[in-house]
Amino acid sequence: MTRSVLTELRQIGVRISLDDFGTGYSSLSYLNSLPFNKIKIDRSFLRGLEREGRALKLLNGITRLSADLGLLVVMEGVETEEEFKLITDYTAVDEIQGFLLSRPAPNKEVSALFNGRKLSAA
């Protein structure tokens, strides 16, 4: 039932993301059985990330597999320039989100960022 509903939604143009991949009930089998457009990899994969380390090899494998399946790959929770550099140099991540880019912000501030305006301190 879930697959058929997601397939119908995708056919009408809804983009479907698998959030927090690698935690809880997520599974590699979902990548094969459900019609996702995007996979969002949980921040937990950034713990212990270092050049040539096991965590980086695991993250690289997951991102390359996802990219090979035609999925857009997002890395959640990027907080440092070092994490950003490792991700961009050694993985197939397409997009990042996290505190490195911005802390959570109210809608008004986000709109101002997209419109290129500066806000005064409130």
Image (cartoon, helix red, strand yellow):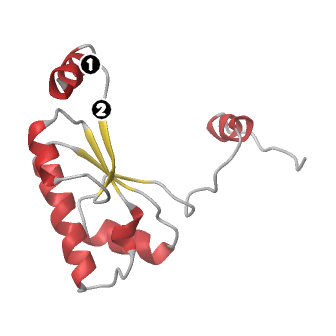
Q: Residue at x 21, y 16 (%)?
A: 8
Q: Quadrant of the N terminus?
A: top left
Q: Are marks 2 and 1 in contact (CB under 8 Å)?
A: yes
Q: Which mark is residue 16?
A: 2
Q: To which residue does mark 1 refer?
A: 9
Give coordinates of residue 64: x percent, y percent. 16, 59
Q: Disc 2 or 1, which lies upstream in sequence?
A: 1
On screen, residue 83 above or below 77? below
Q: Classify 10 Å Cα crowding around label 1: few (below 14), some (14-19), many (20 and above).
A: some
Which of the pair 83/33 is nearer the observer? 33
Q: Residue 83: x and y, percent?
A: 42, 73
The numbered disc on residue 17 is none
- Whether residue 90 sits left or right of residue 42 in the image: it is left
Q: Secondary structure at mark 2?
A: loop
Residue 69 picture location, percent across and down: 11, 45
Q: Is residue 104 left or right of residue 64?
A: right
Most extreme residue toward the top is: 12
Neighbours of disc 2 within 10 Å: few (<14), some (14-19), many (20+): some
Q: What amino acid is at disc 2? A: Ile
Determine whether the residue tagged by mark 1 lies in a helix, strand or loop.
helix
Q: Residue at x 18, y 22 (%)?
A: 7
* Amino acid type, callout 1: Leu
Residue 31 versus residue 45 in the image, above or below: above
Residue under the point 34% across and 74% down: 86
